[in-house]
Structures are given as structure tokens and as C-alpha cells.
Image (tube, helix red, strand yellow):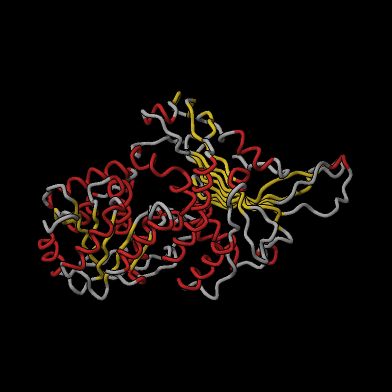
């Protein structure tokens, strides 16, 4: 089965922070893959912008090295690489003063009729400065968009300030707040699974679902993000955006259509229905952890404090028991967890259905296990439905717990594109469906803020856990005191 590639109209993508890690690892490879797929049309250009002095040729050499490192061998095509390099231009600009902005305007003026996108792959502290420079130098056209990366604020107040600053320059429909998790194939398949099949949606409620687990686990440590991560922590870095967005897609009501506003309206309702975790509930319903020295697949690894080189109580692990106060989900707990230096790299959503009300099978047949739907986001994207069946063969009824397993890589004879590829093209198409609206961001912070405040007021400490495990024992207790267990790798 092959996928249909629909070309997008020609564009200018201006990447601020073009010599940084995100551009090198993700943005340049993603744009190259879209060219390789035949999606880019002439006279599309990618314009790098940062403070580093660099010529066009030097930027092209930088891009070639990045592609050499991050592409698979069979994805390198000399002809395509040269064509892609020909699209690349570079302008040295400074977000804090007017240096280089006239040169950028002169370059962009040669493509006035093109879709124009500004990607801010830079620190959020200069989002506002860049937005204002774009306005002051009259770089905004009727087909201009701006893309901002997380984190959007450190709390509700700072998120509102940042949104206000950008909102004074750009209209809301021009602002694309990117969360790359929403670009993953499996995340979108979650909507297809729910809303394109008669099988699941009638059961998608508290009458049939016992609980939901959402896990985003990383096996790596800080990896060069020391200065950012120690100020953020796992709750701000992962829960406020990635995990809550996944929760929204699991829990939202069917939208009237797949149009952006219809989908985002339903996600907003979920965020506003989250039961606040305040006061004494913070310590009861949340767990903070911090990894210690241990082992990974590559051998022994240091603890967080050793990597950081200074004392810190920043959490590298969070587990939360959340509830949604609405008709569909009343009484169904959502167990959320994320962390670094865990047993494996894995992101998944587990929907655990309620057990059957009565078993007609005798003890010799074996235990009847409740059905589960496992939606795997990474590393092996796919869907697995766990069912009870009869063990084949004579000799009476023996039950087995088995899965119907669909791996996207095996089911479809197509390359699975990186999330950024889809999202970068959605910006050009002006499709906001997979991007966060301002009120979504602020509603998420409104739920997160009391947890942060509760940690601070009660002095809730991080619990140590050994690298290469699934987190602190308190996270296990969080779910097991409800008579449930975390779903681990199969």
C-alpha cells in the first residue's frame, strides 16, 4: 500500500536558530525528506537566520554535514542533495538589534507572492523580540505564519505574557504553536481508530473502560540540555504539553468535523474538565522522582546530580493520577508518567477495559484477563488489541491472553515520516488541526500551576530511582493502591 504525496505551494521558510541543534537534527532533514517525496515546488527556499556570521555556501555545507549525519544511507541522493542545497540561503540577524534585518527583507522581497513562514527554533526569551522585528521591518504578508516551539511560558502568567506579545504582532490564525508529538502517525491514528470505526466509540466511556495509562519514557539523561532542563523539570517539559495533548485526544468528544477549530474546541473542553489537583491532594496524587546512577543499554551511567554538577531537586520523573470531571469519564482514572533514564525508550497509551461481569469458564481454563488496547507511539508505531482466545488444540478449553498486533512499518509499504515533516507542511497549508491554540496552552497551565505550587508549599521532595528502572517505588504505589499495575514492555 502506498501513500499519496500532495505537493504544497511554493514557500519561503525562515528558520531562526538555523545553526542550532533542532534545525540540524530535525528541521533540515525533515524539509529534505519532503523534497525527496516530491512535495516541494519551485521556487521554494529555506532561509537560515541566526547571529553566527555565515555565507550561503557555508550554510549549505553545514546542511550537508547535518544530512550526512542524520539521514539513512539509502536516503542520500547526490542529485536531490544538490537541489536541496540550492534552496538554502543564509542571513546573519540579531534579535536584539537591527543588524541583518534589511538584508533579510531584501531577500524575502524577491518572493513576495510566496507563502512565508518564520520558524522560531530559539529560546522563548527572544520570541517576542523576533516577532517585533518581523513587524518593524514590514516582513508580514497576507500569507505569513509564525511557528513557535515549546516551552510557551513557565507558568500561566508567563504563558499569557508571551501569548500577548506574539499576539500583538500576529493574528491567532497565523500562530502555530508546535508540539511534535501531535505529528506522530499513531497520534492521528488514534482519532481514526476512535471515529472511523463502529467497534470502539460505543465502548469509549466509563461504563466499559476501567482506566487509561499514558507513558512517555526516555532512556537518555540530560544530553546537552542541562541549562534548560534544570529550570524546567519533567512536569513543565513533558506533562504540560505532550502528555496533556495525548490525554485530550484520548478523552475528547467526537468533533463535528476534522476542521482545526472543531478538534481544538473539543480538546479545550477536556482540559477545562480536568479535576484540579490542589492542597493535600498534590502529595497524594503526584510523585516526583530524580534518577540516580545505574545502568543503561550502553553500560553504567551517572546520576542526575553528577551530570548536573551541582545540588538540585528538579524532577526528572513525574507520575500523576488525573481525573476528568465530565459525563463520559466520571470515575475513570488517567495515570500519567514520564521520566528520563527509564528502562527503555517508549511512548504509549494503554486503554484498559473493565473485566467481564461473570466468567462461564472453570478454573482449569485459566484466568480471564481484561481486554486492553495499546497504542504505541514509539519506538515501534502501531496498535495492539489484547484479547482472550482458546489455546489451539484438543484437550479441553484453555484460555490464552494474546494480541492482535498491527505494526505500521509492516502493514504499510511506505516510509514512516518524522513528525516534523508533517507539521512543517501543515504550516504551509495553514492547517492548524495539530497545533495548540492559545486557550489550550493556558488551560493546560491552569491545571499544572497548582501542582507546582503544591510541591513548593509542601516541600514535596524528589524520590530517587536507579537509572534503567521504571522510576521510584512511590510511582508503583500510586497505581497499585488502586488495585492496578503499570503496563510495561510486552
Quarter placement of the C terminus: top right
Question: Residue 266's x, y, as percent?
Answer: 54, 69
Q: Position of residue 357 (x, y in %)?
A: 83, 55
Asked whether, in this view, residue 364 is left or right of residue 326, the answer is: right
Residue 406 visible in this rendered orientation of the protein: no
Q: Is residue 265 above or below residue 288?
A: below
Determine the residue positioned at 51% across, 50% down.
Answer: 377
Residue sitting at the far top? 300
Based on the displayed image, in which of its 4 quarters is residue 165 positioned? bottom left
Where residue 321 sits: x, y (%)? 61, 49
The residue lying toward the viewer, choosing from 5 and 133, is: 133
The count of marks equals 0
Q: In front here: 136 or 65?
A: 136
Q: Quadrant of residue 247?
A: bottom right
Residue 325 locus on image (x, y percent): 64, 62
Compared to 53, does 258 lie above or below?
Answer: below
| Residue at image point 42% right, 29% down | 305
Q: Nearer the viewer, residue 156 or 243?
A: 156
Query: Viewed as shown, does residue 71 lie left or right of 268?
Result: left
Say if residue 45 shows up in the picture: yes
As drawn, the residue found furthest toward the front would be: 457
310 is higher (above) or lower (below) than 270: above
Amino acid at each position: 500500500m502506498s501513500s499519496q504525496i500532495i505537493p504544497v505551494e511554493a514557500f519561503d521558510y525562515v528558520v531562526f536558530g538555523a545553526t542550532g541543534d533542532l534545525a540540524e537534527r530535525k528541521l533540515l532533514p525533515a524539509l529534505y525528506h519532503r523534497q525527496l517525496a516530491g512535495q516541494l515546488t519551485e521556487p521554494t527556499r529555506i532561509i537560515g537566520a541566526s547571529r553566527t556570521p555565515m555565507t550561503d555556501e557555508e550554510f549549505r555545507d553545514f546542511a550537508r554535514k547535518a544530512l550526512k549525519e542524520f539521514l539513512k544511507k539509502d536516503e542520500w541522493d547526490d542529485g536531490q542533495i544538490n537541489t536541496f542545497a540550492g534552496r538554502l540561503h543564509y542571513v546573519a540577524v540579531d534579535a536584539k538589534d537591527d543588524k541583518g534585518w534589511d538584508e533579510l527583507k531584501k531577500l524575502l522581497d524577491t518572493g513576495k507572492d510566496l507563502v512565508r513562514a518564520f520558524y522560531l527554533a530559539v529560546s522563548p526569551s527572544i520570541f517576542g523580540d523576533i516577532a517585533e522585528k518581523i513587524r518593524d521591518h514590514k516582513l508580514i504578508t497576507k500569507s505569513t505564519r509564525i511557528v513557535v516551539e515549546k516551552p510557551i511560558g513557565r507558568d500561566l502568567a508567563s504563558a499569557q505574557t508571551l501569548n500577548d506579545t506574539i499576539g500583538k504582532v500576529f493574528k491567532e490564525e497565523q500562530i502555530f504553536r508546535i508540539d511534535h508529538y501531535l505529528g506522530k502517525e499513531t497520534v492521528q491514528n488514534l482519532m481514526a481508530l476512535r471515529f472511523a470505526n463502529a467497534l470502539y466509540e460505543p465502548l469509549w466511556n466509563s461504563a466499559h473502560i476501567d482506566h487509561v495509562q499514558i507513558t512517555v519514557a526516555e532512556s537518555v539523561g540530560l544530553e546537552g540540555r542541562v541549562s534548560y532542563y534544570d529550570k524546567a523539570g519533567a512536569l513543565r517539559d513533558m506533562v504540560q504539553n505532550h502528555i496533556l495533548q495525548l490525554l485530550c485526544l484520548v478523552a475528547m468528544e467526537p468533533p463535528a468535523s476534522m476542521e482545526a477549530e472543531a478538534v481544538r474546541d473539543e480538546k479545550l473542553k477536556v482540559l477545562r474538565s480536568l479535576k484540579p489537583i490542589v492542597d493535600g491532594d498534590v502529595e497524594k496524587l503526584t510523585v516526583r522522582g530524580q534518577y540516580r546512577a545505574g545502568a543503561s543499554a550502553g553500560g553504567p551511567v551517572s546520576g542526575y546530580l553528577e551530570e548536573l554538577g551541582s545540588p538540585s531537586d528538579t524532577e526528572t520523573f513525574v507520575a500523576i493520577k488525573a481525573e476528568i470531571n465530565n459525563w463520559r469519564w466520571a470515575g475513570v482514572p488517567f495515570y500519567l508518567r514520564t521520566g528520563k533514564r527509564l528502562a527503555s525508550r517508549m511512548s504509549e497509551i494503554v486503554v484498559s477495559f473493565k473485566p467481564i461481569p461473570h466468567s462461564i469458564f472453570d478454573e482449569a481454563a485459566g484466568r480471564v484477563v481484561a481486554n486492553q488496547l495499546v497504542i504505541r507511539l514509539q519506538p515501534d508505531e502501531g496498535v495492539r488489541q489484547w484479547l482472550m482466545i482458546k489455546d489451539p488444540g484438543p484437550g479441553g478449553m484453555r484460555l490464552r491472553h494474546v494480541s492482535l498486533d498491527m505494526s505500521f512499518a509492516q502493514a504499510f509499504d511506505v516510509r514512516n515520516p518524522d513528525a516534523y515533516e508533517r507539521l512543517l507542511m501543515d504550516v504551509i497549508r495553514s492547517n492548524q488541526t495539530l497545533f495548540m491554540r492559545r486557550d489550550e496552552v493556558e488551560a493546560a497551565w491552569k491545571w499544572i500551576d497548582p501542582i507546582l505550587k503544591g510541591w513548593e508549599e509542601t516541600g514535596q521532595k524528589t524520590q530517587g530511582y536507579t537509572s534503567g528502572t521504571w522510576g521510584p517505588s512511590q510511582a508503583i504505589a500510586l497505581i497499585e493502591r488502586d488495585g492496578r499495575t503499570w503496563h510495561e514492555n510486552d
